[in-house]
Image (cartoon, coloured by chain):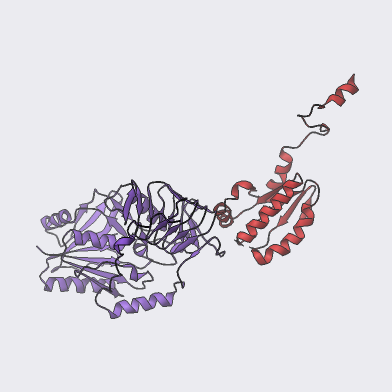
Chain colours: A red, B purple
Amino acid sequence: MYNRGPVIVMELPEQLRQAEVKTFLDGLLPLLETDRPRIVLDCSRVEHIDSAGVEMLLHCLEEAMKRDGDLKLSAVSPASAIILELMRVDRLFECFPTSEQAAQSFHAYGTGANPPSQPWYSADFRTADLKAAS
Amino acid sequence: MSLGAIIVIPNPGGKFARQNAGGDVLRGESLSCIDVAGRSLAERIIERYLGAGIDVVSVLIQEPAFGDLSSFHVTSSKVTTAVVADLNSAIANRLQDYSDRGLEHSFVQWTDVYAETDLLDFFYFHRASKLPVTWAFDADGSLPMCVIDCANPTAIDFGTAPERPTRNAASYLIHAYVKRFAHPRNLREFAADMLQGRCETRPSGQESKPGIWIDAGAELHRGARVVAPAYIGRGSKIMDDTLITRLSSVEKNCCIDCGTVIENSSVLANTQVGIWLDVCHAVVSGNRLLSLSRDITVEVSDPHLIRSTAATSRSTSEASNRVEDYRRSSDLRTPPPLPEAWQFGSNFIRE
């Protein structure tokens, strides 16, 4: 596991089955409980994945989204991709050829240096800036 | 005029077989022994010869044969079956036997190819050519199919002859439907061709609605949706909320569990597909799935997803035992019992 700024890249084990899921999840859950977690799961070593492994991925994605974060997959092998398609979850994950590309994708739509304090749909959007200017 | 036929069922590394990752899905079974829309390719070929009025048909199964040999349901007394090691000598012996019985000509065909040519026209062409052998070919090249003089078999090496036809041979062009079988994707294509009516042969069972063939004993839940054209095999169960669509075929004794979509795919015999899955553009057999879009086979270890419904998995030893059984018996096996009348169509929809 290595950390690259706000994006955490974690390697999945070779076997992602019922027996391995709990151990892996114990290490991943604390990272998901941070604010806006940005996680990349590197699937390059994964050889076998079953329904328990897919369920774990979905659980992690759910936890990340709850905290306004995201979870992306990288280096998904064709065999793993077939399992994801078979279980209809392939559409839920962004997949990238490499972990670097996956990590960069978190910054591709980055906000400016001084993001507005209010969302664009808020009635108070940029009113504070306008008041200060006047 | 008396005609014979020799049908050769090659081993999985047959004449057109190529080494391909996709071939793993069948666990080494011969493509011609796999049921497609209810019947195997070998059965369909044998039926074509019997339908053309051929007097004697000899089926030679080339060793090592790991196919499900019990799947043959041909019950005609005109058909004999044998497992052979040396194909050349076995064919020569059969031709000699035919000649002794007064048969002048014989077809020799490998089940690597299915051709819907007019067999009698093929024979008349051969007789007019006055050459000892006539090989068939189509627009894509030579085919492992010929007519030969029984009394004058010449020294043909049947292991290489179709690829390198002898000089003293005629060639017969087939314009009709031809399908070569070298990869499991060809099974899928053959099923699609049958369902779309591109060939003369049809799926087994009854056409309950236009384009939907349901075989005996199949059970479809009221909430299941089958979009034509599609085939549901003998004894298969299609559960609630499933969708079978886009030229899909579900062979015998399969179970498609709730909410699953089978799209443009073939589910081979004795396969259970779990709940809420999406099987698209694939061939599934037991716990193996061949993705035709990626051309790779995945063995799924999780029985909740896909698995075999067979009580015991097939093994090489079991297959060898079957081959031994065949070797000991010169006649065909006792045919399986025909379905009772009540099994046809009475239980298509069951809660």
Q: Would residue B250 appear left or right of B54 to someone viewing this image? A: right
Counting from the top left corner in percent of width and height, residue B280 is at 49, 51
Q: Quadrant of residue B170?
A: bottom left
Q: Would residue B50 appear left or right of A77 to someone viewing this image? A: left
Q: Residue at x 32, y 51 (%)?
A: B207
Which quarter of the rendered picture does the N terminus of chain B lie within?
Answer: bottom left
Q: Residue at x 46, y 66 (%)?
A: B309
Whether residue B193 can be seen here: no
Taking depth in this image into account, of B57 and B161 the one nearest to the observer is B57
Taking depth in this image into account, of B256 and B185 the one nearest to the observer is B256
Q: Quadrant of residue B106?
A: bottom left
Taking depth in this image into account, of B299 and B272 the one nearest to the observer is B272
Taking depth in this image into account, of B151 and A99 the one nearest to the observer is A99
Whether residue B192 can be seen here: yes
Q: Would residue B42 appear left or right of B128 to someone viewing this image? A: right
Counting from the top left corner in percent of width and height, residue B36 is at 36, 58
Q: Would residue A89 appear left or right of B307 to someone viewing this image? A: right
Counting from the top left corner in percent of width and height, residue B243 is at 47, 49
Counting from the top left corner in percent of width and height, residue B183 is at 40, 58
Q: In the displayed orientation, state which residue is furthest to the bottom.
A: B328
Report the label total.
Answer: 0
